[in-house]
Amino acid sequence: MSNEPQDFDFDAWKELADADPQAYFAERRRVIENFISTCPPDKQAVLRDLQVRIDATRASSGSPNQSVRELSRMMEDYLLALSERMMALHRETSALQSSLRQGLRGS
């Protein structure tokens, strides 16, 4: 199986999972690790930690539907935190621009 997103073949993955779950999970691990290894080295540990959290959530959820709900909540929490950081950065940038303008006027 290819690890290119545009080459994802759901039916082939489903068939592999049905026919040989152990091979499915090994292939899944391989594809995920191949993807992570293409990312910048300073991001790889973060991505591996995230994958561990995703796998733990999936394993402890009890059902695929519950897993999707919990992973969606996890993504929502992350996006909310990112949004809050962006707003704080915007406030700091605005304050810096204001200070620079005042400094230029005072010169």
Image (cartoon, rainbow, N blue to C red):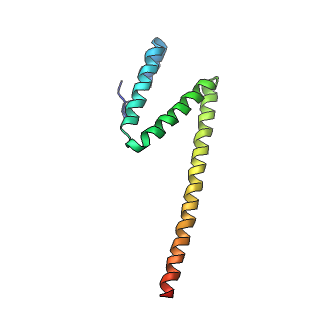
Check the image and report above or below for 11 versus 4: above
Q: Residue at horizontal 41%, vertical 44%?
A: 42
Question: In the image, is 74 to the left or to the right of 23?
Answer: right
Question: In the image, is 2 to the left or to the right of 61?
Answer: left
Quick one: which residue is furthest to the top in this view?
Answer: 19
Q: Nearer the viewer, residue 42 or 79?
A: 42
Image coordinates of residue 47 in percent, x first then y, are: 47, 38
| Residue 70 seen in the current view | yes
Q: Nearer the viewer, residue 5 or 39?
A: 39
Q: Residue at horizontal 51%, vertical 35%?
A: 49
Q: Residue at horizontal 52%, vertical 36%?
A: 50
Image coordinates of residue 32 in percent, x first then y, are: 42, 30
Q: Nearer the viewer, residue 74 or 45?
A: 45
Image coordinates of residue 3 in percent, x first then y, are: 37, 30
Image coordinates of residue 26 in percent, x first then y, are: 43, 20
Quadrant in the picture for residue 2 = top left
Question: In the image, is 39 to the left or to the right of 106?
Answer: left
Check the image and report above or below for 104 versus 1: below
Q: Residue at horizontal 52%, vertical 71%?
A: 96
Q: Nearer the viewer, residue 34 or 46?
A: 46
| Label tally | 0
* Quadrant (top left/top right/bottom left/bottom right) for the N terminus: top left
| Residue 15 seen in the current view | no
